Every structure is written in C-alpha cells, then in structure tokens.
Image: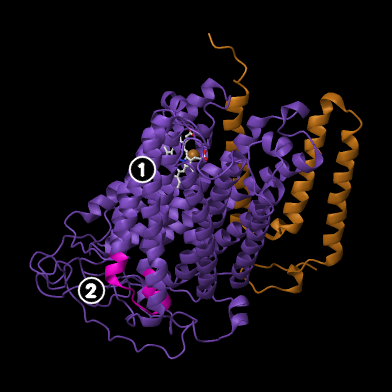
Chain colours: A purple, B orange
Amino acid sequence: MSIIVADEPRVGPVPPEPAPLKTNYLNARSGILSWLLTVDHKRIGILYLVSLTAFFVVGGLAAGLVRINLLSPTGAIMTEDQYNRMFTAHGVVMLFLFLIPSIPAVFGNFFVPMMIGAKDLAFPKLNLASWYVYMIGAGFMVWSVLAGGIDTGWTLYPPYSSRYSQSNVFPGAFGAFITGFSSIMTGLNIMVTVHKMRCPGMTWGRLPLFIWAMYATSFIQLLGTPVVAITLTLLCVERLAGIGIFDPAIGGDPVLYQHLFWFYSHPAVYIMIVPGMGVISETITCFSRKNIFGYKAVAWSSVGIAVVGFLVWAHHMFVAGISYYSAILFSFLTMLVAVPSAIKVFNWTATLYRGSITFQAPMLFTLAFLVLFTVGGVTGLFLATLGTDIHLHDTYFVVAHFHFVMVGGMVLAYLAALHYWWPKMTGRMYSDFWSRASATIIFVGFFFTFVPQFVLGYHGMPRRYPNYPAEFQVYNVLSTAGASILGFGYLLPGFYLTLSLFFGDKATANPWSATGLEWQTPSPPSTFNFDRTPVVVCGPYEYAIGVDQLGRGLPEPPGPGSADDPASHHGPTGPAGPMHKETHVVG
Amino acid sequence: MHTEHKVDDPPTMHDVDSPGAMFLVFLVVLGLAVANILLATTGLGKLALPVQLGIASVQAVLVAYYWMHMRRGDQVVTLSALSSLFFVFIFYVLVLSDVLTRWRIAM
Ligand code: HEM
Ligand SMILES: [Cu+2]
C-alpha cells in the first residue's frame, strides 16, 4: 500500500498538540537501580550520554595540558616523558571512549527505534550489556592512566609498545580490546533493528538519512572491530609472553602490525564521522525547510564510504617501509574514498540553495560542520597524495587534518545532534541565545587552534614532540590561545543545558517543526515511544510540502511566524506561500 | 525423526543444542589446539604452515558450524558468513600487494 503525497505545496491539517504525558520514560520508574538495570533504549542512551560526557571532559583536560606544555619551546610544565603519556591519554580517551561510541551509542540508541517507528532496539538486553562492557573497558583504561599512563601514542606501534616501553601498555590495550566488543554489540543491535523492526510504510527508500548512516556505520563496526581485537590480542601476547609476532628481533614483522591496526583504524575514522554525516542530513533539511537534495546519492554514499573505507588503510604507512607499488595503489584508492564524502558535501550545499534557512543552534553547528569538515577532507587529499605525504607525514599538518574532521566535523555534529534532539530527550528547551553563542565561540576558537597547526606542520614541526625551534613559538601560542577559546565554548553547553533541565521552558512535541517520526510523539516520550504503531506514508523530508512522515501537517516552525519569516508556512517560500519551493517526493 | 522446520517457525526442542554435543565440540576444538601446539615443537619444516593452518581452519569451521549455529542458518546467514571470507580476502590481497613487492630493488 502506498499513499501518494501530491507533489504540490499544501499545508495539511496540523494535528493537535498531544498532552504531555504523566508518565514518560524518565519518570516511569525511579531510583538508581531503575537506571542501572534498564533495558529501555532511551535510558541506555542517557547512560551513555553521561559517561561519554565525563570522558570528554577527561580527554579535554589532557588536551589542555598538552597545549599548555607547548607554550614554550622547551616544554612549559611537563617532563618529556610526562608529555608522551599526556598526549597518549588524550588520544586514547578521546578516540576509544568518546568518538567511536559517541553518536551511535547516544543518539543511535535513543533515536534509531524512534525514527523507524519501533518500540525498542531488537536486543534490549544486549544493549544494556554493551554499556557495561564499555564501562569495564573504560575501567581498564582508567587503571592504566592512574597507574602512570602509556607513552606509546594511541597507535601502540610495536616493537616499542610490545617489548621496550616501561609504561602501562597492557591495561590500556586490553581496555581498548574490551570497549571494541561494546561497539560490536551496538552495531549488531542497530543493524538487526533496521532490518527487522521498521514500522509499516517505512521502506528503505523512506528511511531518514540518519538511519542509513547508522546502518553503514554498523557495517563497519561489525566487520572491522574484530580485526583490531585480534591485533591487540597479538600485541599483548608478544608483550606478556615474548612470542615473536611483530618484533623483528624475535622473528616478527612490525609493518604487519601497522597493516592490521590500520585495517581497522582507518575504517574506524568512518565509524566516527558517518553517524555525524547522518545527523547533518537531518538538521540541514529541517532548518532550511527543504527536502534533501539527492536522497539516494546521500544514502548510498554512506554505504560507499563504508565499503571503500576498507581499501585505503595503508595511506598511514607510506613512509613505514611498504613497497612503492603498494604505496601508489593505496594513494589512488585513498583518493577514491573522498568521492562519496564530496558527494555528501555537494548535496548538503545544494539542499541549502534557496532554502528558508534559520539559524538556531543546531543549524549553526551544522553550518560549522560543513565548513570545517570540508577543510579536513580536502587536506586529507593532500595527505593522500604520495609525494606530498612524504613531506607532511607525522607533522602537525596531519594533526590539523584529523582534528578538522574529528573535532570540526564529528564533535560539531555531535553537538548539533545534542541541541537538535535535547528537547525530545529531556522535554525542555535550552537558552537560544547562549546556545548560539556557544556555537559561534566554538567555531572561532576552532580556527584559532588548528589553522596555525597547518602552518607549523607544513614548515616541518613533527607531531608528538615536546620541544620545537623558537621560531615556531608564535604559532604554538596562537594555537593554545585558540584552544582556550574552544574550551570555553565547550563549557557553555554544560551550563545552559544543565540549567534547562530545571528552568527551561517545556518543549512541545515538535519544537523544530520537523518531519521525522521521533517528533510525532510527546516530549519526553513514553517508555514504548508510540501509543500505537505509526504508519508511514511518505519520505523523510517533505518540508517543502509541509507534511510529516505520517502525512499530517507540520506545526509552525520556531521564529516570529510572521508572513516575512522565511521559515513560516505562509512566508513567501513556505509551503503555503506564493513562491513555494520546488520539490520531488522521496520514497 | 526429522520434520521439516522453517526458519520463521517458533523454536522447538529440535532447535536447542544439547549441552553434551556442545561440550563435545569444545573438547575437539581444545584437542586440536593442543595438537597444534605440540606439532609446533616437532619441526615439521616445510609442511608446518599448511598443516597447522589446516588444523586451525578445521577449528574455525567447527566453531562456526556448531557454536555459531551455522548449521541451522538459512541462506542469508550462510551468504553473510561467506561474505566475511571475501572481506578477509580483500585484506590478504592488499597486504600481499605490499609484502610481495617489497623487496624488489628500485631501478
Ligand atoms: C575525506 C577523506 C580523507 C582522506 C583522503 C584522508 C586521508 C588521510 C591520510 C592520507 C592520512 C595519513 C597522513 C599521515 O600520517 O601522513 C590521514 C590521517 C588521519 N586521518 Fe584522514 N582522511 C580523510 C578523512 C578523515 C576522516 C573523516 C577522519 C576522522 C573522522 C580522519 C582521521 C584521520 C586521523 C585520526 C589520522 C591520523 C591518525 C594517526 O596517525 O594518529 N580522516 N588521513
Ligand atoms: Cu586513514
């Protein structure tokens, strides 16, 4: 059965605002045990949110200390050995405990079932188990840090890590091994849920792009993570038992480790970014009141990234002693993987074209993502170019590249998601002014922090060194100054989001006038999300026509609501306005 | 007595593994592991690699077939499992593109 939504502007009858629920998922049960033993995907999402935030703070503090140390050419506050341990702690915590779980574990858990009209994930208990496994792995990492840290860098290259380092490699590597299983569990859960639990009418062609992105991510998690688990196991075997696997002195091959490690860890950077890309597709359509440009291209490019992302890993090894032939091959393959990323960026930009754009906080984060991710991606191409990389490898240029994609891209997408869905998750609105201020401050601080690092790297400052020639100091000071602006920007949401829980206005069911199913239920939702199974009649982003996925009219978007408000239904380019947007119906 | 049982049917006792059978498989896998370790000390020479990898493959197949319930999987499950072999194949091919050409002297 399919109900065809006419491809002509109209504003259907807006459903009445549902009464806020007396019992929602937050107050259905109370007490600490009701959280620790919950199998509700939404509560597990919150558990992850709280733990991830804590680790983000820890990783951020380590970053702050690294930057402070770099204020002086001879190291301002730490010994060289402490410095090694500090940047390793920063990398390990941020990657394994924050970025890899981030969006899938928090927003994937919370919103995948809601967006496809399901009651929960396919395996609720496995979901809870994944959080415990994550916490146990995190415990091992905290142990390794408290016992004095690791000095190998997050990449744990042998033979240094396996044979010579005196630091706590084992608990750290073992912790990463364990958190990997939590990642696999989440991926498995989401994949099965998307296959099996879509509500009637939710065809593959009508899935929100966030779901496509989460699906592609689970694919990488499922295929890639076991490889790193085995790699870390082999590393521990060599370290603990002295069996020669990677150390050439006892018959091993150190480059083999790098192959195995990057076979996971390059795809892992896509585990980090692809969910963020999914969020951007949601917010950019909502805040420009337009259908996505090229639904299929955006959906399939997520899958394309997941597949091609597995073919490019040795671009991290161009100067590690791999053969020239292989290096050329990988250089070429790496350039291929930029194609699907670029497809997405072009399609988002085309989505903005002639949109009725408004600048609420989620949209500011989204626009910042677009700019910063593009810079990050394009500098990735510089590094993919074999000849250039021989100059740039292991310099601050690489550091700037990956921070542009991971912080400018992923962390901003995470913040966009947090600001977009916060009203749904908590039932409260946060301060409009402060949230916009925070987005702006983060954007400015980010540029100050990382643009100087491109310059530094290009001029040859190696990464992971505590000392540098005096002429580099000005760039390092600039970067540290920027980092303090950035840090301040990150602190703000901690305040206004927390305050919103107590003093914020009550959120309506659909405060952004968005089309997705997750908005067609009260805020905060009940334990089982919907009081009856929703039936989807159209694609996910019919903003130009003005209907949600249930085929009902959308409420008036936030803003002055007057006829000259571009986002309003009756504004000139609104669905009922005289110059309504052209659209083609998806799904 | 064997009756036709479709994947979507509710589970019956027929679908439950007996602990004995599972334990037996476990013992066989363990036994093969011990055999492999012992073989490693005997110096098989050229034969070592094929023989020992062969034993490891048998172990992997046993685990997949019994413990991962591949023997009851439908075609989609079998196909997914086989595609993981394809995935490993990609890894080997691209790593070999390095290893097999690494020692050639540049002209
Ligand atoms: C758009 C396509 C991309 C291309 C072509 C690309 C290319 C590269 C290359 C060639 C390197 C190695 C540089 C070197 O060590 O000499 C590199 C490093 C890195 N990239 Fe990217 N990249 C891309 C996107 C991303 C994304 C989306 C992320 C993360 C979300 C990311 C994260 C990283 C990280 C973490 C490293 C450094 C790892 C380390 O050595 O510690 N990249 N990238
Ligand atoms: Cu990479």
Residue indicated by mark 2: A558
Quadrant of the image occupied by residue B14:
bottom right
Q: Position of residue A324 (x, y in %)?
A: 52, 21
Residue occupying the point 56% across, 69% down: A122
Which subunit holds the residue at mark 1? A
Label 2 or label 1, whichever lies nearer to me, is 1
* Magenta stretch, residue numbers: A421-436
Q: Ligand 1 near label 1 (Cβ, under 8 Å)?
A: no
Q: Position of residue A198 (x, y in %)?
A: 46, 69
Residue indicated by mark 1: A478
Magenta stretch: includes residue A394:
no
Image mark for residue A264 = none
At mark 2, the secondary structure is loop
Magenta stretch: includes residue A430:
yes
Residue occupying the point 37% across, 79% down: A428
Q: Ligand 1 near label 2 (Cβ, under 8 Å)?
A: no
Residue occupying the point 46% across, 83% down: A526
Quote the CA–CA distance across marks 2 and 1.
38 Å
Quadrant of the image occupied by residue A114:
bottom left
* Quadrant occupied by the C terminus of chain A: bottom left
User: Which circle's residue, 2 or 1, is located before the other in the chain?
Assistant: 1
Q: Position of residue B47 (x, y in %)?
A: 83, 27
Q: Evaluate whether residue A486 shows in this view.
A: yes
> Toward the viewer: B12 or A236?
A236
